[in-house]
Amino acid sequence: MTHAMLRPFAVAAAIVCLLPAAEPTNAAAQSVETLPYDHIHLNVPDPAAAFQWYLKNIGGTENDEAPNRIMYGTTRFMFLNRKDAPPSMGGAVDHIGFSFPDLDAKVRELEANGVKLEGPIRDLPGIFKIAFAVDPWGTRLELVQDPELLGLHHVHLRAANPEDTFKWLLTNFGGERTALKGKIDAVRYAAPDFSTVWILVQKGEAAPSRGRAIDHIGWRAKDLNAKVAELTGKSVTMETQPRPLPLRNKTTIYFAYVEGPSGARIELVQR
């Protein structure tokens, strides 16, 4: 591949990463308990095929609580059965980031497997190497080389006003407003016994995520009823109220959907 193969939107995404980060502001989150990050849900026409594709190309381990679930650390990666979902790019949840110890080797492996790549590897000075790929069902993947956080690395949202999105997250889900690698404005979700996940936001008009290749993202709540009551008191729109879901491993979870910023669909789960 040559540098000319890098598409304009991939260049734009790299430029977004290089913009100076805003001054961290954690005041809004000081009184809000940080929720651990829980899962990502993709729309695909064949969940079993998608499960195998991600295990082969991205890695992870199988979770036996339900069919076709992958674990990246403590974060679940799951698939909904839906045909003809629009691509994730341009949606409120634009793409997902995975980190590998040797990005050059990973890209060679993906090329050999016939994975669609959006251009060559780019080196962002002082940050990390990046490349972009797209899965067969339209989910855009950012591949990075960050030895400090391997596996699922970040979720990249899209919003007309990124600052409003950061404030919404801090106010409702807690988190730490900080700069990834000291340069990328972000909110970091970390909790004891849970994997760290970064939430990044790029500026741009966004379509609602529901029904797109990345349908929704999810956080964990200790007491879902209490969290829903708290969010309702803050005038956050609840798409659904808490309800149970029995799983194959004979456990039951409780879940509810929240209307997130710029149409990002969010699920809250009590496990």
Image: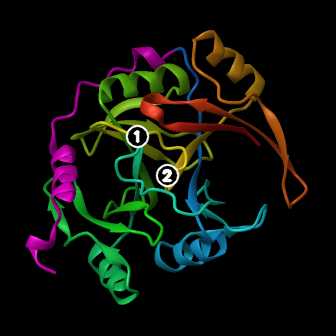
**Span of residues in magenta:** 1-30
The N terminus sits in image quarter: bottom left
Query: Which residue position holds label 2?
Result: 212
Relative to 189, is 46 on the left or the right?
right
x, y percentage for residue 75?
A: 59, 53
Residue 141, visible in the rendered structure: yes
**Label 1, label 2: how far apart the Cα atoms are:** 9 Å
Q: Residue at (64%, 25%) from the top-left corner?
A: 238
Nearest the viewer among 21 and 126 is 21
Q: Residue at (40%, 14%) from the top-left corner?
A: 27
Give the answer, above or below, for where 122 lies relative to 104: above
x, y percentage for residue 25?
A: 33, 20
x, y percentage for residue 251?
A: 87, 51
Whether pointer 1 and pointer 2 mark residues with C-beta atoms closer than 8 Å, the reply is yes
When asked about the image quadrant of residue 153, the answer is: bottom left
Give the answer, above or below, for where 2 lies relative to 84: below
Q: Amino acid at mark 2?
A: Arg
Query: Which residue position holds label 1?
Result: 207
When asked about the image quadrant of residue 97, the answer is: bottom left
Q: Residues within 10 Å of mark 1 (few under 14, many from 20)?
A: some
Magenta stretch holds residue 5: yes
Q: Amino acid at mark 1?
A: Ala
Magenta stretch holds residue 8: yes
Residue 223, visible in the rendered structure: no
Q: Residue at (35%, 89%) from the top-left corner?
A: 112
Number of residue marks: 2
